[in-house]
């Protein structure tokens, strides 16, 4: 089962996305900021990270930079969902495999998730 880590300081948004992903059969955990997420990533490497951009302590961009700089996890796919900073992320395709502006269409996000985790999903 693919393990997805949802990183967002807005609790309700993180839980709504987690519920949508769990309904699709994914194992999902949430983290309130990039630093908590990075600690969790090092404990149990997720198949995919979905992160917000603007968060306290460590932003989504800083999280992506940290992941890409660690050779043991540098190839982990990351999707950014952002209300205001999608343009910055689109300028960094080496960090993010997909960028969605809030509000996004659930179907589009789920299609990107499926594309990025499909090699690990059971048939």
Image (cartoon, rainbow, N blue to C red):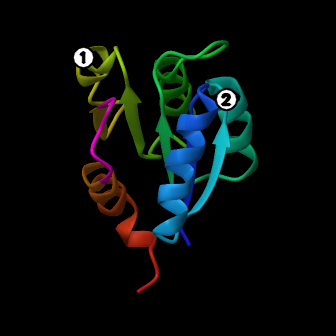
Q: Which residue is disc 2 drawn over?
A: 32
Q: Which residues are magenta?
A: 101-106
CA distance separating discs 1 and 2: 22 Å
- The percent position of residue 6, horizontal first and vertical second, equals 56, 42
Residue at 72% from the left image edge and 30% from the top image edge:
36
What secondary structure do most residues of the magenta stretch adopt?
loop
Q: Is residue 57 left or right of residue 90?
A: right
Q: Which mark is residue 87?
A: 1
Q: Is residue 100 left or right of residue 71?
A: left
Q: Nearer the viewer, residue 113 or 21?
A: 21
Q: Nearer the viewer, mark 1 or mark 2?
A: 2
Q: Nearer the viewer, residue 102 or 28?
A: 102
**91 falls in the magenta region:** no
Residue at 42% from the left image edge and 46% from the top image edge:
77
- The percent position of residue 4, horizontal first and vertical second, equals 55, 53
Earlier sequence position, callout 1 versus callout 2 = 2
Residue at 55% from the left image edge and 25% from the top image edge:
63
SS class, disc 2: loop
- The percent position of residue 97, horizontal first and vertical second, equals 31, 41
**Is residue 120 depicted above or below 20 in this figure?**
below
Residue at 59% from the left image edge and 36% from the top image edge:
12
- The percent position of residue 67, horizontal first and vertical second, equals 54, 33
Tell how many labels.
2
Q: Which mark is residue 119?
A: none
Q: Quadrant of the C terminus?
A: bottom left
Question: Farthest residue toward the bottom?
Answer: 123
Question: Residue 80: which quarter of the image?
Answer: top left
Is any part of residue 75 visible from this angle?
A: yes
SS class, disc 1: helix
Q: Is residue 48 left or right of residue 113?
A: right
Task: Check disc 2: other Cα within 10 Å, few if <14, some if 14-19, many if 20+.
Answer: many
Is any part of residue 72 visible from this angle?
A: no
């Amino acid at each position: 089962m693919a393990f997805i880590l949802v990183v967002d300081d807005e609790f309700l948004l993180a839980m709504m996305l987690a519920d949508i992903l769990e309904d699709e059969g994914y194992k999902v955990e949430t983290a309130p900021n990039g630093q908590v997420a990075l600690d969790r990533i090092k404990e149990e490497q997720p198949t995919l990270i979905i992160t917000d951009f603007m968060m306290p302590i460590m932003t989504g961009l800083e999280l992506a930079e940290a992941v890409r700089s660690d050779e043991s996890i540098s190839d982990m796919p990351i999707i950014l969902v952002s209300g205001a900073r999608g343009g910055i992320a689109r300028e960094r395709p080496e960090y993010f495999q997909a960028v969605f502006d809030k509000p996004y269409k659930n179907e589009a996000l789920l299609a990107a998730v499926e594309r990025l985790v499909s090699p690990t999903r059971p048939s």
